[in-house]
Amino acid sequence: MLKKLFLFVIAMSSICGTSFSQERLLKKADEKYDEYSFSPAIDIYKKVYEKGFESPDLLKRLGNSYYYNAKYEDAAEIYKILVEKYDTVVSPDYLFRYAQTLKTLGNYDASKEVISRFNKMVKDNGLERVFDIDYLTKIEENSGRYDIKTFPYNSKYSDFAPSYYEEGLIFSSDRDTGNLARYRHTWNAKDFLDLYVTNGSEDADGAVVKIKGDVNTRFHESTSIVSKDGSTMYFTRNNFLNGKKYKDENGTTRLKIYTATRNEDGEWEDITELPFNSDDYSVAHPMFSPDEKVLYFVSDMPGSYGESDIFKVQIIGDGTYGEPVNLGKTINTEARETFPFITKDDVLYFSSDGHPGLGGLDVFATKIAFDEYDQPIVNVGRPVNTKYDDFSFIIDENQEGYFSSNRPDGIGEDDIYKFVETEPIRLDCQQDVTGTVRDRISNEILVGATVKIIDEENNEVSTTVTNDKGEYGLNLDCNKGNFVRALMEGYVPSEEYLPRSYGKPQIVDFYLERDLVSGGFGDDLAKLLQLSTIYFDLNKYNIRPDAEIEIQKVIAAMEKYPSLKIKVNAHTDSQGNDAYNLWLSKKRAESTIAYMIEKGIAAERLDSEGFGEEKLLNQCGNGVRCTKEEHQLNRRSEFIILD
């Protein structure tokens, strides 16, 4: 098992960038109008916020403005409000920046709490990568990482399939039947196995007992998993239920997975078989996902690539499940894949004789894959793996675990071995990241913009610049999360967090905001300030609360520049009578002006006009069938700068 990946260390320093100017008036000699420069962040959003107008978008922009300008106390204050009041719309990067600011301010305990939330939000999704190496060399590189210890509960018979249970283990054995159980990892074992429990004591005397209840029968029981709350067990058994044994058309008794519930006396009862079991194929070796919402298992059901494949199925609840899904041909081969075990870090350990190994069944590690992208399959190496069968590998958070083997130095046919992992296994993962960088307002490509990869410890991993097409390409280590950050002089930096992944190539496009936005006569202030669309309710013209926030941004700009005059143009779609739409648009424009006057803007600085459906942005005129989204594009307000 891999050790837990790093807790995300927060130590981000201020990035390079241009401070937002409090005021900058640009003049062009060959033009007859003044050109205003607007800071789209601190000087506008702060003023709106201080007036009591608040939204997630406003807080994000204001918090980022402080953050990128190294104003960490202010950033922490804004981010705190954002993540506490609007947690459902906060993405991981905002939690990361909030934690950064707290650590920069020396508030380490609070930073750790935020990072804990961050970790939950960006759970690992596994790996995707083509893996092509000299397997013997790689096996030797991975070898020597385990100290093997004796397991005190082995018998002269067969003992295997350990799983964690309370303070000890559940495992399978035929010790009380006197039968040697060979090749317990195969489908059709012919000796009778039962489930046994250990109490975790190193003293073997009297420490092993059969599991209580109705689980054990006169047929085989093996490989079990118990839910975290201790109430439900999944286990493997021959096709035997309610005293009756079932066979396929060839007379073979297959394996099935059953569930049992634990009663108040600690006994297991209510044995129920899973609905996707069959008399015609085997289903065995259950394992939970870390959140216990998915069951992993092994089967030779239709759709298998080999003798046995690893599958997964959604646990819906109340005895219902989704459709079984094969994990794909990267993990599964034409041979046997079996005995899955999944760590809390989503590392999947399994045994296989289809992947390159040392002989027999070897133990392999990979990341859980939710689609069929190639991911590295890594042989865990010696001494866990040998030329014999090595299987049913499990490991805990302390890097201690157990596995089974039929190697000749044991005392039985199959024996359980205890181990300590001294060094975590490395699952290499490289991810290509490409994209373009553009101006957010004009959509023009930005040539020469810098794009960086910043890891979770705030180390700059790599950097590049965009080409003459505004494109960039980088490669990162997808075993851990990374930030892709775009910067260019005259623009506000932007970044996107990429969590740990399978390595599937990602496209990350950036649309950078100018740190100073210039505008003059005839420009739409709404576009310059990147206002959200100002909506009105159907057939109404009163100002809605969501529209207030956007209009407040315009008011803040006009308060900053006393000479600025604007004209509010209101438009409708083509639905409805033409004359009515013209009247409605005028009322909405007048309503907007009245609101701004009420908030202190002089009337002589404002003008308004309603255009109805005269200036549509698309083909959706009278009689043309259009979607709601197409009509919505025409229902808009403009704030035009006047000379």
Image: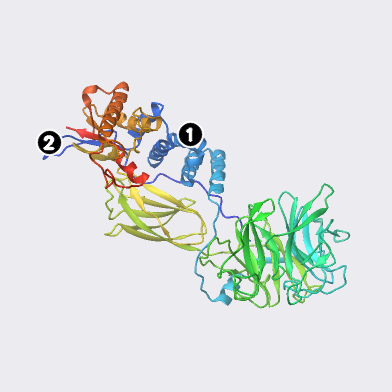
Q: Is residue 382 above or below residue 54?
A: below
In the picture, measured across the screen, residue 295 lies left or right of residue 154, that is: left
Residue 477 horizontal/vertical position (percent): 48, 60
In front of the other: 461 or 213: 213
What kind of residue is marked 1? Ile
Where is residue 349, by image quadrant? bottom right
Q: In the orientation shown, which residue stands out farthest toward the left?
A: 30
Quarter in which the C terminus is drawn: top left
Quarter in which the N terminus is drawn: bottom right
Q: Label 2's element? A: loop
In the picture, measured across the screen, residue 208 lies left or right of residue 292, that is: right
Which residue in the protein does label 1 denote? 81
Instruction: Using a 10 Å C-alpha cutoff, classify the residue at mark 1 as few (fewer than 14 neighbours), some (14 to 19) or many (20 or more).
Output: some
Residue 32's tag is: 2
Residue 135 horizontal/vertical position (percent): 56, 75
In the picture, measured across the screen, residue 245 lies left or right of residue 535, that is: right
Report the residue at 33% width, 47% height from top: 626
Q: Is residue 642 visible?
A: yes
Q: CA distance from mark 2 to mark 1?
A: 44 Å
Instruction: Using a 10 Å C-alpha cutoff, classify the residue at mark 2 as few (fewer than 14 neighbours), some (14 to 19) or many (20 or more).
Output: few
In the picture, measured across the screen, residue 121 lies left or right of residue 570, that is: right
Residue 254 horizontal/vertical position (percent): 74, 70
Where is residue 328, by image quadrant? bottom right
N-terminal label among 2 and 1:
2
What kind of residue is marked 2? Lys
Q: Is residue 103 visible?
A: no
